[in-house]
Image: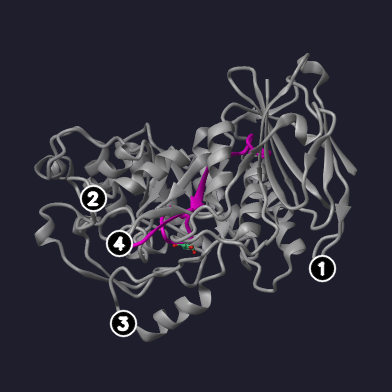
């Protein structure tokens, strides 16, 4: 068996892992909200109409923050439509997804849902069709205990206490021509900075995320980040990154190598942040919010027909990617990459959470189930809390159409508060099992206490409502996995969680 070696030392640290890297995202899009988390007529609905079966799965996943209400949707959203008496709320045409928004779920309902899901809200303001005034009013409505117009309006609408939302996005993907109210870098930099300034005047305790590029391949990448940072450096706290990958060419080795692209995206944006910091002679470091990441391509063709038809339907099945086993492997590698950049990536949102490019799916007339990508995320969220260690890794490599030397093994290691260490590893090789040697001499006597493996002989295998457990992880006996920490078998095409004490 070929070998890989991972050397770890408790003093070689990348940094503390911010629990918000295990965040997710729910947009008013397709069936994410309506018939996803909210369906009053469903047998599993609670007194507010939220599905208890879905909430139970979100809690199992362990999601400390949820970005809301979009996404592209936020760039045309009027939050006032979603507060006050539900039967008086208007129906609105949403130009982001060519659907009709009922506004039955608004601010108060979503905050209540987030609490039930053991999560906090990461709120986005509309900097597409709106701007400074709206951002200011929304902060007052959500966070202030004053006796003033919007804080009083919140009280009248049933919430005496402020929602106290700590993390805010200054718009969404404003560099993209598809965005309602798309802006040049200069236009966005001005509106984002002015909004940020007054939002913090109202509530200095909030943290703000400014839009970076909506993908590494955007033509304005680099200049966009620099312009936004130069204008707003003192008011913003994080810069956002978004990235989705697909395998439309059915080139699995190259698809699985995309974590290399993700890593260079993160390092590139961190370098731009640092260059602006240097230029400004500032003590402040801007960190990163990777607030949209996932695989997304399966549903594109089908969705285009819906947009072209302009039928303005409600809760249409949009972006319902059905994830297969290879998607779960890439999601595992993406999680590893985020953990290996824990010193800069403080927030990350798996996009999205329910039905829309999501780990959790629901049927309107049936139950809820987990897609393949649910499992690596759940493992990382459960066992990936603590300190990210520097993974000194040597691995066999392979070549793809895009990349020269792709390590067969991606790995990260997390030192937990209990002194235990968890290694996450993906073996991307199509044909080679690899024996992983763990050199942990600085830890003293360490033993593998659990080895979780996810593998399927068919990279296209999926989970469905009828067969929800087709692709799931299993526990392998530690002694069967190669014996001790000198030869842990990472089977070809597998996701591995190795827990040591
Ligand atoms: O997550 C789906 C969409 O992808 C979001 O609305 C948008 O921000 C991105 O383009």
Mark 4 or mark 1, earlier in chain: 4
Q: Nearer the viewer, mark 2 or mark 4?
A: 2
**Residue at disc 2, CB closer than 8 Å to ligand 1:** no
Determine whether label 4 and label 3 are within 8 Å by CB.
Answer: no
Element assignment for label 4:
loop
Mark 1 or mark 3, earlier in chain: 3
* Residue, disc 4: 77
Region of the chain picked out in magenta, as a range:
339-365
Give how far across and how far down residue 289 sits, in percent. Answer: 53, 45
Give how far across and how far down residue 347 sits, in percent. Answer: 52, 41
Q: Nearer the viewer, residue 324 or 9?
A: 324
CA gap, disc 4 to disc 1?
42 Å
Residue 271 highlighted magenta (yes or no): no
Q: Is residue 63 visible?
A: no
Q: Nearer the viewer, mark 3 or mark 2?
A: 2
Element assignment for label 1:
loop
Q: Nearer the viewer, mark 4 or mark 1?
A: 1
Most extreme residue toward the top is: 444
Question: What residue is shown at x 52% (from left), y 74% (from top)?
Answer: 300
Residue 401 has which mark? 1
Element assignment for label 2:
loop
Q: Nearer the viewer, mark 1 or mark 2?
A: 2
* Residue, disc 3: 311
Q: For the C terminus, give its image quadrant.
A: top right
CA gap, disc 2 to disc 4?
26 Å
* Residue, disc 2: 45
Residue 350 highlighted magenta (yes or no): yes
Mark 3 or mark 2, earlier in chain: 2
């Amino acid at each position: 068996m070929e070998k890989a070696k991972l050397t770890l030392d408790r003093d070689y640290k990348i940094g503390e892992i911010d629990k918000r890297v295990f965040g997710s995202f729910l947009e008013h899009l397709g069936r994410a909200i309506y018939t996803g988390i909210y369906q009053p007529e469903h047998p599993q609905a609670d007194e507010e109409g939220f599905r208890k079966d879905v909430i139970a799965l979100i809690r199992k996943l362990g999601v400390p923050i949820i970005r809301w209400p979009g996404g592209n949707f936020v760039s045309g959203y009027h939050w006032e439509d979603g507060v006050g008496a539900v039967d008086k709320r208007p129906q609105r045409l949403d130009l982001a997804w060519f659907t009709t928004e009922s506004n039955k779920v608004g601010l108060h309902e979503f905050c209540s849902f987030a609490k039930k899901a053991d999560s906090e809200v990461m709120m986005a303001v509309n900097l597409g069709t709106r701007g400074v005034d709206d951002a200011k009013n929304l902060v007052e409505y959500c966070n202030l205990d004053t006796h003033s117009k919007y804080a009083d309006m919140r009280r009248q609408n049933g919430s005496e206490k402020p929602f106290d939302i700590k993390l805010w996005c200054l718009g969404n993907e404003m560099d993209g021509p598809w965005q309602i109210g798309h802006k040049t870098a200069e236009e966005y930099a001005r509106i984002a900075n002015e909004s940020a300034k007054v939002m913090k005047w109202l509530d200095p305790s909030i943290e703000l995320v400014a839009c970076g590029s909506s993908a590494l391949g955007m033509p304005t990448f680099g200049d966009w980040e620099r312009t936004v940072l130069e204008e707003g450096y003192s008011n913003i706290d994080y810069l956002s990154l978004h990235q989705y990958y697909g395998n439309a060419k059915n080139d699995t080795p190259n698809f699985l190598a995309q974590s290399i692209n993700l890593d260079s995206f993160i390092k590139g944006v961190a370098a731009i942040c640092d260059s602006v910091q240097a230029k400004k002679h500032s003590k402040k470091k801007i960190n990163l919010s990777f607030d949209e990441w996932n695989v997304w391509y399966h549903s594109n063709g089908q969705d285009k027909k819906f947009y072209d038809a302009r039928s303005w339907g409600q809760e249409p099945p949009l972006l319902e990617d059905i994830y297969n086993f290879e998607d779960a492997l890439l999601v595992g590698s993406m999680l590893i990459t985020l953990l290996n950049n824990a010193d800069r990536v403080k927030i990350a949102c798996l996009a999205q959470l329910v039905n829309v490019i999501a780990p959790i799916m629901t049927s309107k007339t049936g139950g809820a189930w987990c897609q393949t990508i649910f499992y690596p995320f759940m493992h990382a969220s459960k066992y990936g809390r603590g300190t990210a260690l520097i993974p000194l890794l040597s691995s066999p490599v392979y070549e793809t159409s895009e990349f020269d030397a792709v390590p067969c093994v991606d790995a990260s290691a997390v030192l937990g508060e209990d002194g235990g260490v968890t290694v996450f590893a993906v073996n991307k090789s199509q044909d080679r099992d690899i024996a992983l040697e763990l050199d942990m001499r600085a830890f003293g006597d360490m033993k593998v206490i659990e080895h979780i493996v996810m593998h399927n002989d068919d990279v296209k295998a999926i989970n469905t409502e009828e067969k929800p457990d087709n692709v799931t992880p299993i526990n392998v006996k530690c002694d069967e996995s190669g014996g001790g920490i000198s030869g842990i078998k990472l089977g070809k095409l597998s996701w591995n969680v190795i827990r040591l004490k």
